[in-house]
Amino acid sequence: MTRSEENYLKTIFHLGGHKGTSIATNAIAEQMETKPSSVTDMARKLAQKGLLHYKKYQGVSLTEIGKEKALSIIRKHRLWEVFLVEKLDFAWDEVHEVAEQLEHIKSEKLIDKLDELLDFPKYDPHGDPIPTKDGKFMERDKKLLSEMPISASGVCVGVKDSSAPFLKFLDKNKIALGNAIQVLEKEDFDQSLRIAMEGRELRISHQIASNLYVKIE
Amino acid sequence: MTRSEENYLKTIFHLGGHKGTSIATNAIAEQMETKPSSVTDMARKLAQKGLLHYKKYQGVSLTEIGKEKALSIIRKHRLWEVFLVEKLDFAWDEVHEVAEQLEHIKSEKLIDKLDELLDFPKYDPHGDPIPTKDGKFMERDKKLLSEMPISASGVCVGVKDSSAPFLKFLDKNKIALGNAIQVLEKEDFDQSLRIAMEGRELRISHQIASNLYVKIE
DNA sequence: AGCTATTTTTAGATTTGTCTAAATATAATT
DNA sequence: AATTATATTTAGACAAATCTAAAAATAGCT
Ligand SMILES: [Mn+2]
Ligand SMILES: [Mn+2]
Ligand SMILES: [Mn+2]
Ligand SMILES: [Mn+2]
């Protein structure tokens, strides 16, 4: 499989094409910053190879084999991200770009050994689950901070937006995965929150709260 | 720079195009398992980019910038080989293929941090020197075993042929880099050697002896 | 020096992945 | 239901990297 094909499969997976859901040509094009006509070409090719379900004008979804391939790339991406943070001291906002390259390295032994070196991590630096070798997904039972009721408490376990600006903002405000958190008050006016985190008290805008995942206890 | 361009530069470096020596189109084609006409095309392109000296029918050599780029790729290749052996328990005959892919990953920070993780190694698993960040080469003072005089002694420090079959042969016969070695006898008939290595006595064919580097003490 | 063999380059074709512009199908709105 | 807007596909082109076959230049050999 070519690098481009792999990127299409991964994108389609992330857009939800693993559950039978049909993904629109335009959505893929936008996500990949390419043109719809290019997507059509690739859809035909990947369908031909048995990796996608595709009917003209009806969008695409992943076949079983396509799903396996996508999961394998996601597994590699996330394991490399863990490696970069744990072994090479990258910050969590620096790893994605490099992992986008590393995920295409072809060597089963490499990724198995890497998994072992990292002690078989279950989650990547952004809290996203790492598929097992045989494609099993262990999605965590988590909720957006913005959806937590008042006085509920939990632990930060992930981010929805994992763009560098958001991650840097969290760093600056000492909001890290693993931190305990409790909702103290919700402001009706702008839906901002007052929260307790690791002894401190913070005010959090709705935009932030709707991009932070919390595991309820 | 594209992956293909990088591979051309690296190959030309290895064929000796760093010293003003002019490298023939055919030699490059053979080494890269491609056709001479493809080499011509690429030569024109890389010359255009200022990475090669190229005059029609006169072969190519690396410019200063071309040499820098080549060294940077060789540095990455060898650092990744060390990583695979030291951190992921790859055998020294398994690393080359994977390093051929990893050498093209683009991230200065990645390679600097990797260098640090490995404790700034000077040589790769095959005894080849790892260029420093600024392209300095530390070639060791070594000799082929086949060229050592009788009763001379030294330490195995590298292989000339680093193909998997040769490396596996060395493993099977417990000949490893770092081993002390002494030439006991040279057979005139077939130029085979009797050597002492780590307590044992071995008979070594000329073909083997002419692919093993020894550092004389 | 002249002829032959080899090396190298050119010309034209192919594959992959992309693009633009135009045509067509589907969806939304009056 | 007809019209308009949007989404998708087709047709044709392009750049990168390669190939084959033919032409041209260089090297090697009487
Ligand atoms: Mn990522
Ligand atoms: Mn991630
Ligand atoms: Mn190698
Ligand atoms: Mn090596």
Image: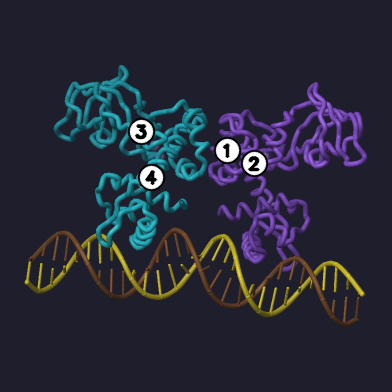
Chain colours: A cyan, B purple, C brown, D yellow
Measured Cα–Cα span from mark 4 to mark 3 = 14 Å
Q: Residue A166 bears which disc, if any?
A: none
Secondary structure of the residue carrying numbered label 3: loop
Q: Are marks 1 and 4 on the same chain?
A: no
Lower position in the chain sequence, tag 1 or tag 2: 2
In the image, what residue occupies the spot 91% across and 32% down?
Answer: B150
Q: Viewer-nearest of labels 4 and 3?
A: 4
From the image, tell me which residue sits under label 1.
B111
Q: Within 10 Å of the Cα at label 2, are there few (<14), some (14-19), or many (20+) other Cα atoms?
A: many
Label 2 chain ID: B
Residue pictured at 76% horizontal, 27% vertical: B179
Distance from disc 1 to disc 2, alpha carbons, whole Å, reads 9 Å
Residue that badge 2 annotates: B75
Q: Quadrant of the C terminus of chain B?
A: top right
Q: Quadrant of residue A144?
A: top left
Residue placed under numbered mark 4 in the picture: A70
Task: Look at label 2 and name its amino acid.
Answer: Arg
Residue A62 coordinates in the image, percent (x, y): 32, 49
Residue A112 image offset from top left, x and y in percent: 49, 33
How far apart marks 2 and 3 lie (CA) works out to: 34 Å
Q: Residue A115: where, in percent of width, then height?
A: 47, 31
| Disc 4: host chain | A
Q: Which residue is mark 3?
A: A129
Q: Quadrant of ligand 4?
A: top right
